[in-house]
Amino acid sequence: MAPLSTVALLELDASGLRRMLDDGKLTSVALMKQVLAQIEQEDKAGAKLQTILNTASRELLLRQDAIATHPDLGIPTTVGSFALVTSKPAKNAAVVDELIKNGLIILAKTNLNEFCNWKGFNSVNGFSGVGGQTNSAYVVGGLREDEASMGHSSPLGSSTGSAVGVSAGFSPLSLGTETDGSLVQPAARAALYALKPTVGSTDHRGVWTLSKRFDAVGAIAKSVSDLALATEMLHTMEVRSRLPEDGYLSFLSKSFTGLKVGFLDESQWHLPPQMCPQIPSVVQQLNGAYKLAIEKIRDAGAEVQYPVVLHGVEKLLMENQTGMSIILFHEYKKNVDDYLEGLDFSEVRSLKELIEWNKEHADIEMPYQHANQGRLIKAYEEVPNATAYESAIAHLHKVSIKEGFDLLFGDKGLDLVGVPMDSKIPSMATASGYPIATMPLGILDHLGRPFGLAIKAPAGREDVMFKFMSAFEAVFPKRAIPPQLVKADEAETELNDAKI
């Protein structure tokens, strides 16, 4: 039985691998050996992607290291911090138990922005003390340290390793968490599909949480069907009970017909230059691909309105900080303390002890260029009061929902809103709690990094999102695989097919 080619390993989704296993064309032992060999070849060596923190050699699902696993699985849960390397959760996170019950197996924990990007100010995407710097599988040479925080070489985060690992053939599927862009942004830069479900629809027991008002557990996948199956497993029992017998698979019609989609103006929705350089050729390619996508979606049967108007993220500000920041700093200390106190064993049991541990171990926890824990300190010392917290909640509801998305979904009767993924749309999604998804749209000529198309839906309407994504997958070119991980002649066709 011949092993999979590198291209096949990079391309095949979980459903495709399952068919090969069922047909006797592949054995689970051979697949696991090949995946572990791919990790050994490209993670710490080769392309030096640095996505994997710990592997369980017997076990095919990557999972961000913010989701607890019992020590019996043999994979520590560190949230990227040396302070938690020896910690022992009392049990698996609820979502892990659900995945195992459904036959998925856990391969490894992946790197992330330490503490889900809530350790220091101006932190680097994809960096943690334990894991070092994760690099894009598409950008040869990895992160350019002189770039802005969301520059074109960045793999983005915080679920960085979860996205890069799937794109590199380390697993067909991965999990992560998202507060503000942590799933969809790195997935877009890895030419993958991802969805942050409606806040409150996924089970957060055993998950490192920044805010229960903003956070959700989600999946990153190579295909829409894999994403649909994984998302269903992540939902609470209450949400799952409302789905049809075939779950989200029932909505994968591969047709845009019947969908009303509004697209935001790309000239208004882009990353600010202080976060990502506005290179003219890149802007031209991104905008051109977006406009072509709109036309293609209209021609394929969707009812399209373009452009539609949504006010910008500046409306989220309250006294020079976002309402989200007020809420996060109000909730974070309690969330950290609750998580640490619930561990069977930990060297630190509170946010205060964590801050002190980092100071005492600054050589490993605050190395050069990453030498601050400002967010942890502020979360401990400057907790906003209840009045500020309630005001922030009311403000975000007003500007993101009542005066924001609901004007589009309600007054205009839209099913979905489309927008370039290279924008601040995740922040508006965070403020509203509404679901957001991304799908691979193309590959930039500059550095060869992928970019995506984002869609937004009202709360609880993931079904409509999956209908759209299944049609997108059927109509648009297949996702590109990383050229540097395969021979040049094998990768050329893949790269050209993904360009628009």
Image: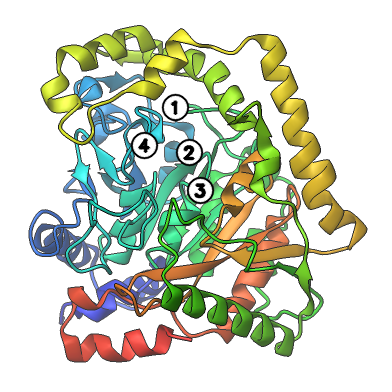
Q: Amino acid at mark 3?
A: Gly
Any part of residue 214 in sight: yes
Instruction: Work out how far the residue at label 1 is from the one at label 3, CA to CA, in angstroms.
Output: 21 Å
Residue 109 quadrant: top left
Q: With respect to residue 200, does 357 lie above or below?
A: above
Q: CA distance from mark 4 to mark 3?
A: 16 Å
Q: Amino acid at mark 2?
A: Val
In the foreground, 392 or 28:
392
Q: Is residue 150 above or below residue 138?
A: above
Whether residue 350 is visible here, answered yes or no, is no
- Using a 10 Å C-alpha cutoff, classify the residue at mark 3 as few (fewer than 14 neighbours), some (14 to 19) or many (20 or more): many
- Mark found first going from the N terminus, 1 or 4: 4
Sequence-wise first label, 1 or 3: 3
> Which of the two marks, 4 or 2, is nearer to us in this view?
4
Closer to viewer: mark 2 or mark 3: 3
The residue labelled by disc 3 is 181
Query: As shown in the figure, which amino acid type bears the numbered disc 4?
Result: Asn
Residue 33 percent location from the top left of the image: 14, 62
Name the residue that disc number 4 marks: 122
Nearer to us of marks 1 and 3 is 3
Q: Earlier in the sequence, mark 2 or mark 3?
A: 2
Secondary element at image label 1 = loop
* Colouring of the image: rainbow
The circle drawn on residue 378 is: none
Disc 1 and disc 2 in contact, CB within 8 angstroms: yes
The answer to whether marks 2 and 3 mark residues whose Cβ atoms lie closer than 8 Å is no
Badge number at residue 206: 1
- Crowd around label 4: few <14 · some 14–19 · many ≥20 (10 Å): some
